[in-house]
Amino acid sequence: MKLSDNLRINAFLAVIFLVSSLIIYRLFILSFVRHSSYSLTAQAQNENISNILARGNIYLRDGQDLFLSATNRKFPLAYIIPSDIDPDLSSEIAEGLSQILGINTDEILEKIRSGSKSLRVISRRLSDEQVGQVKDLNLNGTGISYEIDRFYPAKDLASGVIGFLGYDSEGRSGQYGIESYYDRDLFGNVKSGGIFDSGRTAGIVKKIIGFFSGNDKDKSDKTENDFNRPADIVLTIDRNIQIFVEDILEKLLEKWDAERGTIIVQDPESGKILAMADRPSFDPNDYSSYAPNLFLNKSVQEIFEPGSSFKPITMAAGLDLNKVSPQTTYEDKGFIESSGYTIRNFSNKTFGVQTMSQVLEKSINTGAMFIENQIGDDNFLNYAINMGFGQSTGIDLPGEVSGDINNLYSGRKINYLTASFGQGIAVTPIQLVNAYSAIANGGKLMRPFVVEKIIRDGGEEEVTSPEIASIPISEKTATRLKAMLVGVVDNGFDKARINGYDIAGKTGTAQIPDGHGGYLEKEFIHNFLGFAPAYDPQFVILIKMEKPKGITFAADSLSPTFREIAAFMINYYKIPPTRK
């Protein structure tokens, strides 16, 4: 046998011996050295007590400062140890705890009579008064302990964006919103236990084998088992804007007895979201008390037919292809017939000869269909896609849906015509406000985002950079369309005007599908989109309200609300007047 063969055999045996030693050492550490620690951890898990919760904070913007919106906090809980309780006092103790904690006496008695030697939690998140009263009982087998759990200081403020820390099949996990989307960052990676950690043992073996095989290249990249401390997350949401729009939304829904509403405020230049509000909402501190449907972020997880607020998208295509100009005229006869269908203006009015600017100002359905016929079906579909419809925006929130423009793939002319004025297609609020931001910023469709930066171990900051998703229209087209949307507000929505400022905007009043191929009677979704100052926009606003009562048109219901929010933003940003 050659000497080299003997060396290989000896080296192989040495590797086997070393690996066996590592495994034995690892078993020793697990079985003896860390036994008590793991036992305590297991006991805490069995009793559902989270004695340690390491999770990063979530912050809102507060002007130039930060506002803590999600953190970890120590909470008191009441417990019993059934085996330590005198059986003769069971009923008395159960009655006393029931009165203090507001829990059914029979539930407490059932736990007491189990006779378990383990700690049993009776109630969590006690008030200071309850803690004192339980301590005053001074009875064997009862007591107060503490656990670290998630706490949301601002309660329901921006709760649809933030989400909450809940449970899944593997234990604690972020649910909905930022808590879910950035769950791994907020928890941090699992810490390795040193050189003999099970996750690293295989790596050591690979290095040894690599050494003998000649493939021992040094790799300095971190592996998934490298430990990262929980990261803190700073949102783009501005607390002051968020508070204002949530308050405005509450008042709006109450005024019109509407079922639900959404408001989004976006920075058109960067794509960052300044406010995102849903009503009704929920308090993440007590999420189990709310219906699960309230946890959905309606801005990204629900679709609706936009109605006339889609007309500027159709107009953008016509302007960009030079098929129409703001001064192009056509004759409105009040209806268009196509494929055996008669499609009328929403108000059933006939306007006669009108310019394209007047089509937007008077929200004429036949005008939108005229443009669609000028540009053609394929071009209309392409511009809808390029403006971000029928696909996710890529916003950093979970569960984003893509909208529904499947009708535009049917080849039926009627579907293109109705889509030109926002009927028969469905969009998400974030898609629609993002498309208006593209008009506002000169034709650039940005990727919207809600996380400004992630602060990692050692203070290292991972800052989100603005990202252009596409450039669907030219800057010239955007400028012409801005002027037309200013005309919409100047000549149509006096309740949305603000003295001294160029305001651009458009409303939509959309029917609600009944699920059977038709639409609900006398029930609508109102929406308003606008931006200011029109020729140097600092913000874009979307307002959406579902099923308002006693009002038909969004121009009447939402214009005053848009003006209130726009006036607040102008004052908040100290934007100088753009008109004399």
Image (spheres, grey):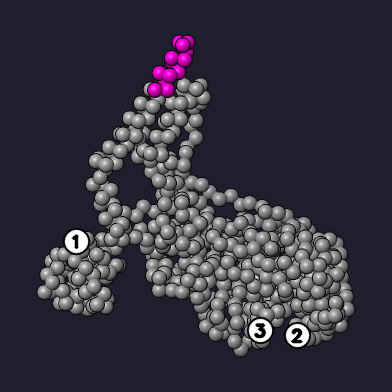
Furthest-front residue in view?
Answer: 1
Place of residue 414 in the rendered image (x, y in percent of width and height, measured from the top left): 81, 74
Residue 546, magenta (yes or no) = no
The secondary structure that most of the magenta stretch takes on is helix
Q: Is residue 164 visible?
A: yes
- Give the secondary structure at mark 3: strand
Q: Nearer the viewer, mark 3 or mark 2?
A: 3
Q: Residue at x 64, y 73 (%)?
A: 304
Q: Residues within 10 Å of mark 2 (few under 14, many from 20)?
A: few
Q: Quadrant of residue 208?
A: top left
Cα gap from disc 3 to disc 2, whole angstroms: 17 Å
Which of pointers 1 and 2 lies earlier in the amino acid sequence? 1
Q: Residue at x 19, y 75 (%)?
A: 94
Cα gap from disc 1 to disc 2, whole angstroms: 74 Å
Q: List the residue tagged with mark 2.
A: 347
- For this view, does 440 lie left or right of residue 63? right
Q: Residues within 10 Å of mark 1 (few under 14, many from 20)?
A: few
Q: Nearer the viewer, mark 3 or mark 1?
A: 1
Place of residue 518 in the rendered image (x, y in percent of width and height, measured from the top left): 70, 81
- Give the secondary structure at mark 1: loop
Q: Quadrant of residue 171?
A: bottom left
Q: List the residue tagged with mark 1.
A: 117
Residue closer to the observer: 77 or 313: 77
Q: Is residue 268 above or below residue 552?
A: above
Q: Is residue 155 visible?
A: no
Which amino acid does the dot numbered 3 rest on? Answer: Leu
Q: Which contiguous range is marked in magenta?
A: 1-13
- For this view, does 336 lie left or right of residue 243? right
Q: List the residue tagged with mark 3.
A: 520
